[in-house]
Image: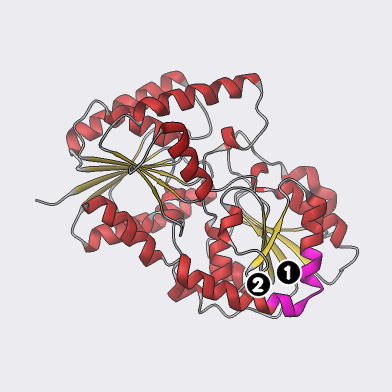
Amino acid sequence: MKKKILFLSNHLAFFVSHRLNIFLEAKKRNYDFLLVAGKQSSNNMENIALKKINSHKLSYKILDLKSYKFNLIQDIIFLIKFGKIIREYKPDIIHTVAPKTNLYGGMISFFFNIKLIVMSFSGMGFLFTDKLNFFNYLKKIIYLFILKIILLNKNLKIIVQNKTDYLFFKKNFKLKKNVILIKGGSGVNLKIIQKIKRKNVKNVVFSSRLVRNKGIIEFIEAAKILKPKFPEWKFLIYGANDYLSHDKFDLNKYKKEIKNKTIIYMGFKKNINKILENTTIFCLPSYREGMPKSVLEASAAGIPCIVSDSPGCKEAIENNLTGLIAKTKNYKDLSKKIEKLILNPYLQKKFSINGKKFSKINSSIEKVTQSIFNLYER
């Protein structure tokens, strides 16, 4: 009889961009696979993801769950419906990803005899990045309390992507063998990315969801400092501007900067290769990550990267070998690091060569996928 995997994701777009490799490998190994996802956060991203999912003939169900919003009635209905799917599908493995789906997937699994529950933490979410108001601080306490109960389940395994999160789970939840560090994040398809031929351009690129905790404000403020000094350089922003989040960024507040071309908003592009072709320096000054796939892809393409010294980001590069690390939430330091690379083509070339080497060792999607299936089949 085929093993059955039930995968719970916050929305289809995240699954396609970060976890489609698991489905493709499951298909090769003759597993049954069912994807359950919450409601979209971006129509643009979701429509593209849906086409990809249908092209692969992936079975999926969408339930009324919003990853960015808590609604007691809707969320209880989601738990009931998700429980019904588990009862009917009878999975051997439940794999969840993202903070809210991890929490709800872990809670509902207590009511069923599931052989293995895997929870992937690709970052810890906004409760671990911002200075919290009283309401959000209370949410964090409740979140950690429920998580502590969920982690009592002996059939549950945790996957994290950086040392900070690994030590967090070991220390706070007294976990030993049940927490696994997979350093390559979601993995990078090196066979495709490393063949990208980069154009001779002068572009500093920010590519991410347009939310504040990705460091987009710091990127724009750094561009305002640097554009007058280096008018021939362009500061490009890629990402979906319709992404719903508690931390939503309003690009309309920067109409002046867009009009005078201090920054150029390029919109959401489904083809990452086209972005990387036109990138000289890649920049992600995020406040916290699991392991940023965009940085791993840029390094694999031989692009020098500048990241913040936050968890996840600082492990995505090797400082002064594949890129530079700037202080988190500090646009002045970020501008200095960008300027250093702009002025030093030799350093750009050095980081480019080292980035490709670093990726081969650390970021291969085959290695990441194999690590996950080792866990499934252990």
Q: Residues within 10 Å of mark 2 (few under 14, many from 20)?
A: some
Q: Which residue carries the number 2 mark?
A: 278
Q: Residue 203: image x %, image y %? A: 73, 69
Residue 51 to residue 198: above or below: above
Q: Secondary structure at mark 2?
A: loop
Residue 56 in view here: no
Residue at (86% x, 62% y) in the render: 227
Q: Residue 215: image x %, image y %? A: 69, 48
Q: Are marks 1 and 2 in contact (CB under 8 Å)?
A: yes
Question: How far apart are labels 1 and 2 at the CA level?
Answer: 7 Å
Prevailing secondary structure of the magenta residues: helix
Closer to us: 88 or 362: 362
Q: Residue 84: image x %, image y %? A: 24, 29
Q: Residues within 10 Å of mark 1 (few under 14, many from 20)?
A: some
Residue 345 to residue 291: above or below: below
Residue at (47% x, 66% y) in the render: 362
Determine which of the numbered discs, if any, sits on residue 203 in the image: 1
Residue 74 lies in quadrant: top left
Residue 231 lies in quadrant: bottom right
Q: Earlier in the sequence, mark 1 or mark 2?
A: 1
Q: Which residues are magenta?
A: 338-348
Residue 236 lies in quadrant: bottom right
Compared across the picture, whether 338 is left or right of 244 comes to right
Residue at (87% x, 57% y) in the render: 225
Closer to us: 51 or 96: 96
Residue at (54% x, 63% y) in the render: 296
Q: Secondary structure at mark 1?
A: strand
